[in-house]
Amino acid sequence: MNLFTDIRALVIDALGALVAEGLLPAGLDTAAVTVEPPRDAAHGDMATNAAMVLAKPAGLPPREIADALAARLLSDPRVETAEVAGPGFLNLRLNPDAWWGVVRAVLQQGADFGRSTIGAGQKVNVEFVSANPTGPMHVGHARGAVFGDALAALLDFAGHDVTREYYVNDGGSQVDVLARSAYERYREAHGASPEIAEGLYPGDYLIPVGAALKEKYGDSLLDKGEQVWLAEVRDFASAAMMVMIREDLAALGVKMDVYSSEKALYGTGKIEEAIKTLRGLDLIYEGVLEPPKGKTPDDWEPREQTLFRSTAHGDDVDRPVKKSDGTWTYFAPDIAYHYDKVTRGFDLLIDVFGADHGGYVKRLKAVVSALSEGRVTLDVKLIQLVKLWKNGEPFKMSKRAGTFVTLRDVVDEVGADVTRFVMLTRKNDAALDFDFAKVLDQSKDNPVFYVQYANARISSVMRKVAEAGVAVDDAALAAAELSHLAHVAEIGLARKLAEWPRLVEIAAKGNEPHRVAFYLYEVASDFHSLWNRGNDLPDLRFLQDDPATSAAKIALARATGVVISAGLGILGVTPVEEMR
RNA sequence: GGCCUCGUAGCUCAGGGGAUAGAGCAACCGCCUCCUAAGCGGUAGGUCUCAGGUUCGAAUCCUGACGGGGCCGCCA
């Protein structure tokens, strides 16, 4: 249930009645009518802008509409007061029963409370991580992984049919470099001193790959030319890298539904087919590009290439799909890959990229727009940098200097739950500070701790009640007489819980999982506040002498725990029941 | 130079066209005989970078400027 959409439906019905009455003209567009929690709680529980939005089309002063609407709404038992305020807001105060209905709904629906159907019938593909299979994942990949996974969970909760997908870049020259690097480790495994030339990957993680190559091939690849071993070693090494990457993802709690291979697009006609489709749309031509505006590279010379007319779909310049030597550019398999996603029937594609790929967005959107003929939208979420801190000092990552911080380093040091939560407490397009000390801090400065602590307090209450032998299953609590709750702080907490379904929809529509993290912080704050008021006002404590009153208080606490757990579930964070 | 992105309290950041713009930290003042003080309450702190525009209404949408970051044919 979503109390906000329920009340909005009530408002729309009331407007319909006013039309029937003749006060309002027929045919008004009510799409812009909203029912929202007011920013200032003094304004009531919910506010609607209906009168302001409709004043002009109806040709009536806003207050006149608001007054008539107020009279109508008051006949609903849920609405206690309806006051016209400001420029024409209609502020509603609801009967406490309306909020207790929310608490009951939480207890009845459990983790499903807040689940939405706005995505029903929508097939969504979330492509994320897609790190090159050339080495372990680093912190930047971790942020993209966490974001993509939480976004996928959020969309699923909002009713979408979600596929989590990883695009394996195993078709380009970087996997040749990987193969040459692994080959040196293979030689090393045979006792040779490795020659890690400039441009090869020096990391130790390839040493076991070299040993495994020795085990599989013996000395049969030694002292042979690249033409003999390159393809074999490339496949072997990139497969080994993917095993490692999957382990890294698993350590973070990320599980992909589909791994798509770039290499698998070559030689199967898939690229040719995608390009042919574009050609059929008159979007492929042979031509010469202008040099980039204002910044001509030193070695620039005009060359004829096969180009994609991406400017016909919103890009700034057309993009090459073939190099001047006739081989495919990196863009070509990407076209084929996105064509594949379109033909698999997705209604919405989401690509999660590092911010350094920002220049790539327009051409991909052009591809999807062209190949789906406008049916499918592509939303690209760019993930900004993670800045690492330790002991108040920033430290720079460098592959060359060996101060490369891997995803595994981070997870090993602070744990998957903390890593995930912290990385989701920021919008994807804002840079993130990650301080190894602060994220483990056990204080309210640390949102991870703060939210977990609220849940632990709730669990503590539940344990104490269970020890006292009182029935505290959700069904029993849902049957509690909730009118024993009357304090504004209690109603405030219930009101916050009522916002959960609404928040889910807002976050899902914007592809913004960070909203969940901020919301949970607010819930935790309201809960801690209520808890602490129990210090001064014994009536506000959760455990009461009177069993009926106690049951009502515990129902509210339990409902809070259910919502916190559901939210953490979307973020992929385990709710803790006890702080240690 | 072009494109993308960001600019909100001293600091770190929220804020899907709504009213008097919020939270945490830092500062100051309070609260443990009491379900976990690992916490809570309060005070103070703002020209939402600037200038135009759209509208009943703009931090939010549009245009431009300024400032930070990113990207910029034959790498992926």
Image (cartoon, coloured by chain):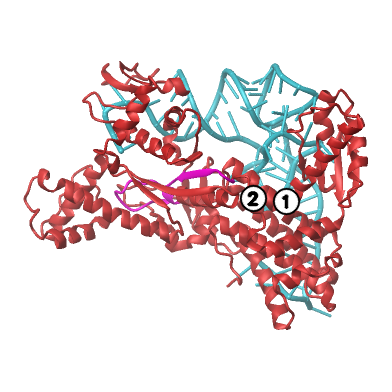
Q: Are marks 1 and 2 in contact (CB under 8 Å)?
A: yes
Chain under callout 2: A
* Above-or-below relation of A339 to B26: above
* Above-or-below relation of A14 to A310: below
Horizontal relation, residue A556 to residue A223: left or right:
right
- What colour is chain A? red
Q: What stretch is highlighted in magenta?
A: A120-142
- What colour is chain B? cyan
Q: What residue type is labelled 1?
A: Asn
At a point 48% along the width and 41% down the height, the residue shown is: A346
Say which mark, if any, is on residue A2.
Answer: 1
Q: Splitting the image into 4 quarters, where does residue A16 fall? A: top right
SS of the residue at dot 1?
Answer: loop
Which one is nearer the viewer's eye here, A498 or A339?
A: A339
Q: Main secondary structure of the magenta part?
A: loop
Say which mark, if any, is on residue A116.
Answer: 2
At a point 26% along the width and 18% down the height, the residue shown is: A303
